[in-house]
Amino acid sequence: MTYLERFDATPEYARFALVRGWLDTEALPLVNELREKRPILKTTVCTFVADFNDVVEVLRVHQVFTNEPYHAKMDPYLMSQDDTPMHFRDKSATQAFLDRDDLPRVRALVAKETNAALDAAQGQIDTVPALTRGVPIRVVEEYMGLQGAAPGKLAEWSYWNQYSAFHNHPWDIVADRQTVDDNVNRSKKELIDFIAGLLAKRLAEAQLPVPILDDNIVNRLVRSHLQTPGHFDILWKGLNIGGLLIGMVETASQATVQALAQLMDRPDVLASAQVAATYDDPTTFDAYVWEALRFNPISPYLFRVTNAPYILGAGRPWQEEIPANTAVLPLILAAMHDPVRFPNPGTFDPTRPPLVNTFHFGFGLHECMGRYVGAVVIPEIIRQVLLRRDLKVVSPLSFEGKPLPEKFVISYNG
């Protein structure tokens, strides 16, 4: 039986859990079938959307398909809102501090930290704690400036806040939501206390006769003289410092380890990617990473909630009115395998235009504001790994029952 035949034969109350389970275990064949045969799939919990154009429409029409699921999780951080003055103002200001001229510096830092971890591991490494989490944490410390936390705390705070924001919704299968909520609340309090202490220390240093502040994002925020009545105060600075951590570590980790696993699973592709890794210009190599991530993005879907009825797929055979207050999950994995946008979508082709028609950093109003930093951190970790010889998978990628990757052990020489 096909997926849809099994779906239709299942009682309505059990259909969502069936589809949600498939998304965790066999997402690509499922979403390909939905895109081809039933691009809008309704369940009692949410509506799945699989057509490329419909996916883009959901993500573009933020006036109807809202960011409401983030409100309780992130307010008053800018990600909790849609097209509001606060969202526009805060994102614009924060992006100014994340200066794109810093990217060579960030890439060099990533290369240094990745090689230090590989050298220390002496030929076998669990990439998740040591590289895909460990290196972004070093970026958060050294480039972004969140220094002085107790060992392991930045990773812990990042993990639980990421869990809360992206993996603890009605369409997520969570065994014990209370435990998640307790860990999230504890982590938020600890992170707030840490940032308050960090800001106090940096503000004092900035007021010395000869300031001793290094150039990092926290210190740029501290030294900032942005002036808008009622905005950009010390609480704003603290909130956005927290966003630097939460937005970087787990998203970069998941993208990196999943792309690396995809490359390691394709010996011929891996060999050609290793050649590209030796080039002085990383552009050719980076395209391998974005193509790998097309096959296993950090999530097969994004999510929105409607605030009014909306006709999706207008004028096409699957046209459907989506009622107000409907959770909608645009299946970006399906969209990134649309044969019209991606000829021969099942073929790994690193010559595709990189980051075109993909959703690796979101889309539209809610596109990741740190995307340019992520776009060097993710591929550079992998590039340094691929410069080692005799790469082998020792233990396959595993989530260990959690919503984020936890283990992927490789061996290497050199």
Image (cartoon, rainbow, N blue to C red):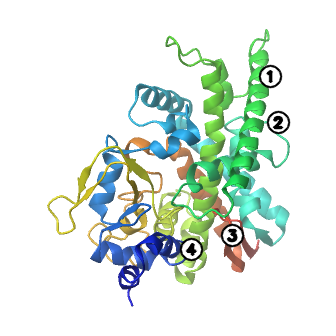
CB under 8 Å between callouts 2 and 3? no
Viewer-nearest of discs 1 and 3:
3
Q: Is residue 244 above or below residue 273?
A: above
Residue labelled with disc 2: 148
Point out the image quarter for the C terminus.
Answer: bottom right
Viewer-nearest of discs 2 and 4:
2
Residue labelled with disc 1: 201
Classed neighbour count for the residue bearing mark 4: other residues with Cα under 10 Å, few (<14), some (14–19), many (≥20): many
Residue labelled with disc 3: 401
Residue labelled with disc 4: 263
- Residue type beneath disc 2: Gly
Q: Which of the two labelled residues, at mark 1 and mark 3, occupies the earlier sequence position?
A: 1
Residue 237 x/y as whole percent: 63, 25
Q: Residue furthest bottom?
A: 1
Residue 318 x/y as whole percent: 22, 67
Q: CA distance from mark 2 to mark 3?
A: 31 Å
Q: Residue at x 48, y 32 (%)?
A: 91
The kind of secondary structure element at disc 3 is loop
Q: Nearer the viewer, residue 343 or 177?
A: 177
Q: Which of the two labelled residues, at mark 2 and mark 3, occupies the earlier sequence position?
A: 2
- Residue type beneath disc 4: Leu
Residue 171 in sight in this render? yes
Q: Total marks drawn?
A: 4
